[in-house]
Image (cartoon, rainbow, N blue to C red):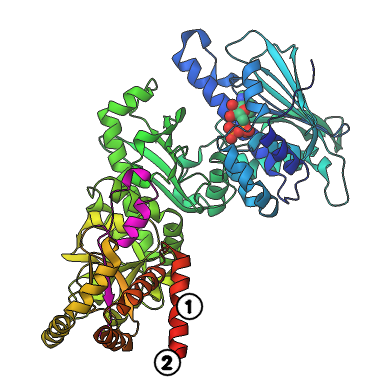
Amino acid sequence: MAKKQFKAESKRLLGLMINSIYTNKEIFLRELISNASDALDKRYYLSLTDADKKVAKKDLNIRIERNSADHILVIEDTGIGMTKDEMEANLGTIARSGSAEFRDQLEKASKNIDIIGQFGVGFYSAFMVAKTITVESRSASSDEAWVWVSSGEDGYTINPCDKETVGTRITLELKDDTEDEKYSRYTEEHVIRELVKKYSDYVRYPIIMEVEKHIPDPTDDKKSIITKEDETLNSMIPLWKKNRKKITDEEYNEFYKAKFNDWNDPLKVIHYSVEGNISYTALLFIPSQAPYNFYNTDFESGLQLYSKGVFIMDKAKELLPDCFRFVTGLIDSEDLSLNISREILQQDRQVKALAASIEKKIHSALEDMLKDEREKYEKFFEQFGQNLKYDIYKSYGMNAEKLQDLLIYRSGSEGKYTTLQEYVDRMPEGQKEIYYACGPSIAEIQKLPALDRLRDKGYEILCFTDAVDEFAVSMIGAYKEKPFRNVTKGDLDLDTEEEKKERTEKTEANKDMLAAMKDALGDTVKEVRISSRLKDDPVCLVADEGVSLEMERILSQDPRNSGMKANKILEINPSHPIFETLADLYAENPDTVKDYAKVLYDQALLIEGLAIDDPVDYSRRITELMIRAAKH
Ligand code: ADP
C-alpha cells in the first residue's frame, strides 16, 4: 500500500521528536507501557461487561523482548488492540485535540521542551530513540490484524498482517549509537529493569521480560550456568493502594507524569482514603502549570474512576465541581458498580455523595496550602486562581461563601498577595469599604490618580488585573460586611465635614463653568464635578454607580453587550492650578473652557488606559493650546 502522509501538525511534532535534544529520552518506555496498560484496562473492562469478550486476568500482560545484536526492542500487550481505522486515527495524527494551539506554540516548543508533554505525544516519543517503528495490532472487535510502519517524517504505511492474538506489538528499531547517545543501551537487561522500576512499577498488569539467571552447575559447583526465564519486573501494586508513608515524592511525581500526560512534577499531591457510607481512595494532583487549553472550552476535566482496582472510565467530570476542575487524578471505590455508565453517573446519589466528599477534601487541602505553604499557594493561584473567581461569577455568587477565603489579591504599594481576611484585619479605623482598582498591570494601577487620597489615609487598594476580578467581587458584594468599592466609581466619601462644606461651596461658586464644560462634552459624560479623590493630578474619569469603566471595556468586547455603558463623570481637582486657570478663563470668555474640557476629558481617558475617540482632534487641540500659551 502507498505511503500515507502524517497530518501537518503531527509531522512537525515528529520532526521535533526525531531531532529531540531532550535529555530524558528514556521516558519513551514509560509512555509505551502506559499506553499498553490503558489498552489492557479497556480489554479487561470489556471482558467484565460483555459476555462474548471474556478474557482471563492472567492472560492480560505486557511483554518486553530485546535483541541486542539487532538493536531491536519490542513492547507487546494483550490489550484491546486497534482496528485499521483506529490505527489510522490514533497513530496518523496527534491524539489530543488542540492542534491549532499546538501549531502556535510549536516554535516556542523547540526552545522550551516542556510544552511537548502537554500535548499527549506519548506514542511519538518513541521516535526519540527509534529509526523505524512497527505496530502490529489486532482489535478485540475484529478478526483482522494490521501493521503500521513508519520511519518518521516521510509518512507511514498500513497493511494487513498475521497476528493470532488480540493486542498490540510495537517493534522499535533503535537509532544507531552516536558519541552523545548510546541507543543500544535500551536493549540491555539491567537498563530495562531499572526503567520499569523507576517509571512503571505501579502498573497493575505484569510487565514480563525474559531474563538471564545464573544457577549453580550441578556437574561442577565452582561454575554456574546461565538459563533464561520469564520475570515480572514490576510490583503491580497500584500506587494509590500503597501506604502513604512509604511513598516517596519521586514515586508520586513519576506516576503523575506517566499517567496524566504532564512533563512537569505536580504542584500538590492529595492522597487519602475515606471509610463510611461510601468508601474510597483518592489520589489527586494539582498540576504546577495550567494545561495549554485550560481556559478554552475544549479542555476536558474529570477524574479517572476505578472500582476495586478495575479501571471504569476516564474524565468522569461528575466527580469534580467546576470550581476545582484543574484537579486531575483518580478515585477507586469498592462501592460503585462496574457497570456504572456516564448516564448513571449523572444521577446516582452515591456519586453525588462521593463528589461532595471529594470537593470538601480539595477545599481543605487548598486551605491548608494557603495557611502552611504560602509560596506554593501563590504559584497555584497564578495558574488557577482565575478559575475560582470565574466560578464565583458564574454561580451568581452562590459559591462565593465557599470560595472567597481562597482568593488572594495583590495589594498595597509592594503588590504583595493578601487574602480578604488579612486585608480586613489591617483596615485602619474609619475605613468602611474594601477598595480595589482595575488595570492591565499592577504598575499601571499603582499610578492611577484616584488612589492618592486613599493612600494618604492609609487605605490599601487591591489590584485587579484579571478581566473577571470585578465581576467576581460584584457577586460577593461584601466580605465580612465590608462592601467592595471600585476607586473610580461613585462617591468615595473621604472628606471630613469641613472638606465637604468647602467642596459644596466651590461647586456652587463654579456651577456655570462646570455646566459649560459638561455642555461641551455633550452625552459622553453625565456630569463634570469637583473631585474629592484627587491629590496631585488635574483630572480623572470615574463612573457613577452601576457599570464601571473597566466593566464597560470588557463588556464592549462582546457586541451583545453594546448597551452596557458606564455613566462617566469627569472630576476636576479643585486644588490643582488648572482649576484656577479654568475659572479665570471662564470669567474672561466662557467659550474658551470648551476646548479645555475636551482636552481634559481625553487626558482622563488616557490615564484610565482607555482609547480616545479622536486622536487627531486631541492632537490639534493640544497644539493650539501650546501656540496660545507661547503667545502669552
Ligand atoms: P495518548 O496515549 O496520550 O492518548 P498516544 O499518542 O500515546 O496518546 O496514543 C494515541 C492513541 O493510540 C491512544 O489514545 C490509543 O487509542 C492508541 N494506542 C496507543 N498505543 C496503544 C496500544 N498499545 N494498544 C491500543 N491502542 C493504543
The count of marks equals 2
Please identify the quadrant where the C terminus is shown.
bottom left
Q: Position of residue 593 (x, y in %)?
A: 30, 78
- The magenta stretch is 547-575
Q: Position of residue 57 (x, y in %)?
A: 54, 20
Question: Which mark is on residue 156?
Answer: none
Which residue matches tag 2? 632
Provide the secondary structure element on which disc 2 rests.
loop
Q: Residue 558: within the magenta?
A: yes
Q: Is residue 206 visible?
A: no
Which residue matches tag 1? 623
Which residue is found at the position 54% from the left and 16% from the top?
A: 56
The picture quadrant for ligand 1 comes to top right
Specify the amino acid type for callout 2. Answer: His
Specify the amino acid type for callout 1. Answer: Thr
Please identify the quadrant where the N terminus is shown.
top right
Which residue is found at the position 55% from the left and 32% from the top?
A: 204
Whichever of callouts 2 and 1 sits on the residue coming sooner in the sequence is 1
Picture quadrant of residue 422: bottom left
Q: Position of residue 631 (x, y in %)?
A: 45, 90
Q: Please, is residue 543 above or below residue 48 in the view?
A: below
